[in-house]
Image (cartoon, grey):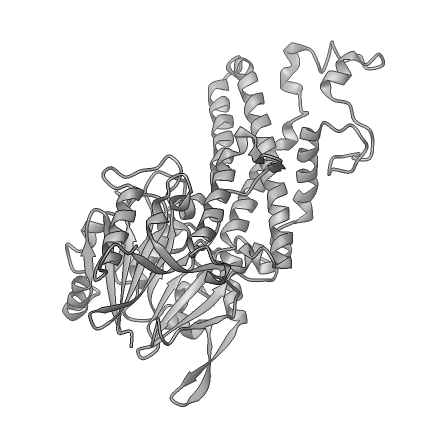
Amino acid sequence: MIDSIKIRMYRHGFGDCFLLRFFSGKVRQCSMLIDCGLKKNDSVEGVTLEDVRDDISRLLRLGVTGNKKPRLDILVVTHEHWDHVSGFHPAKKLFNVFSVDKLWLAWTEDPDDEDAKVLNKGLQKRIKALKIATDRLKKNTNGAAEFYMSLAGGDKLLAIRKDFNDSLEGVLEFLGPLAVTKTPDGATVKEQYRISLDTQLAMDHIRTLANGKETGIRYCSPGDLIEDKTGLPGVRIYVFGPPRNKLLNKAAPSGGAKKEVYFGDSSLAGFVDGVVALEEKSTRATDCGRPFGNVPAFSIEQAKDHKYLTMEKGYLDPGCNWRAIQDDWLDMAGGLAMQMDSDTNNTSLVLAIEMIDSGKVLLFPGDAQVGNWLSWHDYVWTVKSAGSTKTVNAEQLLNNTVFYKVGHHSSHNATLKEKGLEMMTHDDLEAFVPEKEGQYSGIPYTPLIQTLKKKTKGRLIVSADSNYPAESTLKNRPLVLSAKEWKAFSDSIELEPLFVEYTIRG
């Protein structure tokens, strides 16, 4: 029976990589890797993804004789964001040195799932629209720099505009797949879509790691119960998400149903269609969400040469650039970017791992946001217990959670309050945050960090944030912890520059 689990969080920067090892006594029964990625252009001095890979290889080689590849029993990939999957990109071949037995993905990645097909088709179109809008806004900003600088305070206005454009590009760094065109020679892609394509290439390569066998891939749906009495005796794994209903796209709390924004929301559908039409340079009358959308429209270039339009002394006068509004509507790309980022986060595969004898639970929610969390409470699992059966729900599992991998690097909307963290009432609750300072505004969300410290009685460890150094966590016993609790906690932690490891005993 599994009587201990070692959870190793790597400290390589802003990205998730967790290695779980399941033991019966001193014998490792199973290994599980949950994600491995790093935000684009981020790094930690002295800690690379290659170092992470080498450490995983070293651990899995323990007890292996001969030239056999180190065996990774289960690879879990939660969702398609670069900071969760970049380690699997085929160009690096980091994980080709492993023998991967099983691959677990969310149902949203299943190529044969009809709901997943619709979801991904819509996402691809939105990614394309966001890229077109971002490129156009960036070009317009660069072209208007002289005009901005002619205004009082124009330097500040220009800086704000550039920050907005950079934020849009920041979201694009995480997204994929995008704009791939099949040709007789294979797949081609425009260079400006390279980042999103790389995310898809990583996801495609992940599938080849499971011994190249489709039978090695499991697409997990909410409500699934995974039991393996041979590989994981004494352990149950509950699949919480991602949901299959409209909650998949609820990104943030709201005051009522009318304030909720869902994937494919009609308020942005017209915007997406209109932006895509820009690239197609279509002049046909179509309702793309514009005012008077069914009326044929002229481009600025067409208007300059039209014999009935005389705007040279007004709208088209260089001195009246400040009056030009033709691209102002593209600022809606900000709302689209936020919605799309949340959409992908909410497709996170969420696992609750239970040690049956003790009832202790480990919660790994990926980057799940509000709708994903809410949906967990729609499910009830029937399990065998002491020769009979009983039902288990999400609230009971949250009550017994002793380890929480904090969602989405501790952002404001990825840890639910009333139906989430407040239900984690176990005295031994510990939380890990994979995060690094200065990467995104508002991450980590300070009020959440403070609440987590209170809920865990100070047993909160952040991987790579200099504002919350992991080393300081072990220096002094928090007053709310008894000497016995402090010893149990400190004895269960191994802290190195490369990783933090916590051992949970059943």
- Residue 254 visible, this angle: no
- Residue 200 visible, this angle: yes
Instruction: Find residue 98 and report its horizontal and vertical position in percent.
Output: 33, 53
Q: Quadrant of residue 383?
A: bottom left
Q: Residue furthest right?
A: 308
Q: Quadrant of the N terminus?
A: bottom left
Q: Is residue 29 above or below residue 438?
A: below
Q: Quadrant of residue 130?
A: top right
Instruction: Find residue 432 and report its horizontal and vertical position in percent.
Output: 31, 56
Which of 448/244 is in front? Answer: 244
Q: Is residue 410 above or below residue 324?
A: below
Q: Residue furthest front?
A: 66
Instruction: Find residue 421 and report its horizontal and vertical position in percent.
Output: 40, 63
Instruction: Find residue 393 and report its horizontal and vertical position in percent.
Output: 47, 75
Q: Is residue 254 above or below residue 138?
A: below
Left or right side of 201 for 496:
left
Q: Residue furthest bottom?
A: 387
